[in-house]
Amino acid sequence: MAADLSQIVKAYDVRGVVPDQWDESLARLFGAAFAQVTGATAIVVGHDMRPSSPGLSRAFAQGAADRGVDVTEIGLCSTDQLYYASGALNLPGAMFTASHNPAQYNGIKLCRAGAAPVGQDTGLAQIRELVEGWLESGAPEPVAEPGTLSGRETLEDYAAYLRSLVDLTSIRPLKVVVDAGNGMGGHTVPSVFEGLPLTLVPMYFELDGTFPNHEANPLDPANLVDLQKRVPEEGADLGIAFDGDADRCFVVDQHGDPVSPSAITALVAARELARNGGTGTIIHNLITSRTVPEVVRENGGTPVRTRVGHSFIKAEMAASGAIFGGEHSAHYYFKDFWNADTGMLAALHVLAALGGQDGPLSSLVAQYDRYVGSGEINSTVADQAGRLAAIRAAYGDRADVTLDELDGLTVAAADWWFNVRPSNTEPLLRLNAEAKDEATMAKIRDEALAIIRA
């Protein structure tokens, strides 16, 4: 193994191809380093359904035990189930998953006690340095009294905790199609939905980390096609798709039409504000729809805009005491869930909102979907800074627009806005545009793309 881990230690997690880029021997070193950096006496470890996950997870646990740390292994779980265990047990945690990546990948999502995030600035860089040093000089000797490894079941407790946060007891009966994509939703959904007035139509619930039916990434429209077809066929009220580690959820209405994650953010924000007496801070990143801050203000809340990236959302959640946060990528964060993201809890909110009234989902979400968005459009560019400067020059002197640089460059007018931000890892600029109607959005989108791709 090379002593440069920059290819697998990312901004927020560890991720790479197994065994080409990392393997169980490296996982064991990561376990030892995690123990050292957190200074914990005990941690909790879980894993998804990928073929390499059990071995990597156990090696990591043994590496931590070598440093004298007691390890609770919760086995197969979703990422938000691991966050639940970290929060409920107040222990640092490690989740072995590569989320929606193809089968040959695996990774580690790390958190401190109470599901507090671990990223480059909060321990991940230190962990990488330790492991790189040990790869060159040899791993440290195990301590005289190694820690213990013990198993624990958390699925039922996790499911009960989620159900305690959303009252679904008095909703009308609903039929819901769930596409788990052969990921961890197939493990968690039956327990979470148990006893609720729901008729569940399962799709691809068999745990299979080779993803035989489609990639477990519901943000790619190709992976929603099966669900979109099945919902109207079944006469279902809605469909829900989860990604591989089931921490993100995507919703389609009774026609099979996708519901924007911004609309879900606005809907859940309104419900969480109502649950908190009509006050509270709601976090949204700067490429969510303008609908979100509008709905937040209409419901008595205070919207706070952040950069794109879950570390920024989680940091702002903690700093502001926010009750809820949402991202365009279908990550949803809850104060009552240790500021961590859980797609399952967002899904329960959607079910409660739909079942608490008589109309179809398309009518319910219409009030939370007021604008036309472009979706994210990526352009390969050689000079990111130069193209951003060209956009700034094109719009900077216009009296009817404002510019801000919270994350890339946002150009905003009364009835439209667009944001262009550079990728951290590739020579790309990412464009998101939104306007009051399709024609305006298309005009603004095409103007921006012409400058970006000039």
Image (cartoon, rainbow, N blue to C red):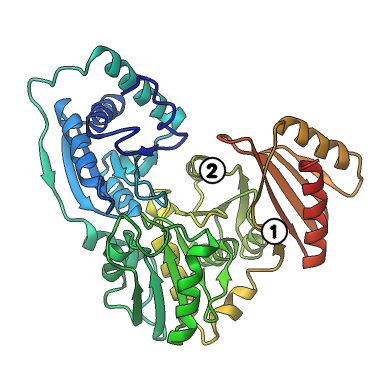
Real-space CA distance between mark 2 and mark 1, rounded to the nearest whole angstrom: 19 Å
Any mark on residue 374, and which?
1
**Percent x, y for residue 1?**
30, 24
Residue visible at 75% across and 40% down in the picture = 404
**Percent x, y for residue 365?**
59, 73
Taking depth in this image into account, of 244 and 33 the one nearest to the observer is: 244
Q: Is residue 187 above or below residue 139?
A: below
**Percent x, y for residue 248?**
44, 57
Q: In this view of the protein, can residue 421 be seen by the observer?
A: yes
Which of the 4 image quadrants contains residue 125? top left
Taking depth in this image into account, of 320 and 125 the one nearest to the observer is: 125
Residue visible at 57% across and 55% down in the picture = 328
Q: Is residue 379 above or below residue 327?
A: above
Helix, strand or loop under label 1? loop
Q: In this view of the protein, can residue 437 be seen by the observer?
A: no
354 on left or right of 93: right
Query: Could you tell me the amino acid type at mark 2?
Result: Gly
434 on left or right of 394: left
Question: To which residue does mark 2 refer?
Answer: 309
Closer to the chain start, of discs 2 and 1, is 2
